Image (cartoon, coloured by chain):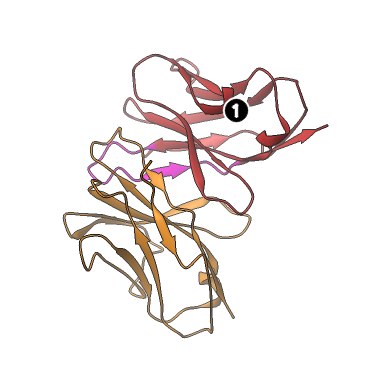
Amino acid sequence: EPEVTQTPSHQVTQMGQEVILRCVPISNHLYFYWYRQILGQKVEFLVSFYNNEISEKSEIFDDQFSVERPDGSNFTLKIRSTKLEDSAMYFCASRRGGSTDTQYFGPGTRLTVL
Amino acid sequence: AQSVTQLDSHVSVSEGTPVLLRCNYSSSYSPSLFWYVQHPNKGLQLLLKYTSAATLVKGINGFEAEFKKSETSFHLTKPSAHMSDAAEYFCVVSEYSSASKIIFGSGTRLSIRP
């Protein structure tokens, strides 16, 4: 069964460094998402991506964040200058199409900013 | 705006007894509703979804949920709890928009007593 994959599973970085979190969505899916979950808190929407552009982003998704689909299979989230409060689990999700379709989630990348 | 409220942050039941995890939603439109489960250190797995078909929805691992429009509820139930059901459960509503981001409830941690 196809699944969303994410790498790395755990990323440790120093404050101020850039990180890139990688996702491979399910191959015939058209909509892509990033969510994050700070330890002990609810899962929060960051950004949605469709047709090679951002379709919606949350207040959290400021200028430090960017997304890209560089090669038709990978979907990346870049944080330019990490802050301590960026420490969280980051989930990638993809959806085939239609607002009622299921979003399928990857296993997540745990980002720790020191 | 759509939202979900999970009424219990923690539920503890004995193995073999019924499980009830409560969720209320708020939506201007006919919503799409989902339950996801997150086992410790794992990603988010879809349990079941409601998309305006049958109001009683059956999911994986013996879980089911009933959509009650009059009560704006989508409670998750299971007749007999198993130790492997111990996890965090999230009630989720999908926005009726092209981006169709999903909005998570705060989660309910289910503990199973032997």
What shade has chain A been given? orange
* Quadrant of res A101: top left
Which residues are drawn in magenta? B94-107
Is the residue B83 above or below the residue A23 in the image? Answer: above
Question: In front here: B93 or A106?
Answer: A106
Bin the neighbour count of mark 1 within 10 Å (Cα to Cα): few under 14, some 14-19, many 20 and up.
Answer: some
Q: Which chain is red?
A: B
Residue furthest to the left in view is A51
- Residue displayed at 50% across by 78% down: A83
Question: In front here: B51 or B113?
Answer: B113
* Quadrant of res A40: bottom right
Judging from the image, what secondary structure is the residue with disc 1 in? Answer: loop
- Residue displayed at 45% across by 32% down: B34
Question: In front here: A30 or A100?
Answer: A30
Q: Is residue B96 magenta?
A: yes
Q: Locate residue B55 relative to residue B91 in the image: left or right.
A: left
- Where residue A18 appears, as percent x and y from the top left, is 41, 81
Magenta highlight: main SS: loop
Question: In front here: A26 or A103?
Answer: A26
- Where residue B99 appears, as percent x and y from the top left, is 26, 46
Q: Is residue A68 magenta?
A: no
Is the residue A108 above or below the residue B54 in the image? Answer: below
Residue furthest to the front in view is A1
- Residue displayed at 45% across by 38% down: B3
Q: Determine the chain carrying the residue at label 1.
A: B
Q: Quadrant of the C terminus of chain B?
A: top right
- Where residue A111 appears, as percent x and y from the top left, is 52, 69
Quickly name the residue at label 1.
B22
Disc 1 marks which amino acid?
A: Arg
Is the residue B55 above or below the residue B23 in the image? Answer: above
Q: Quadrant of the N terminus of chain B?
A: top left
- Residue displayed at 61% across by 54% down: B41
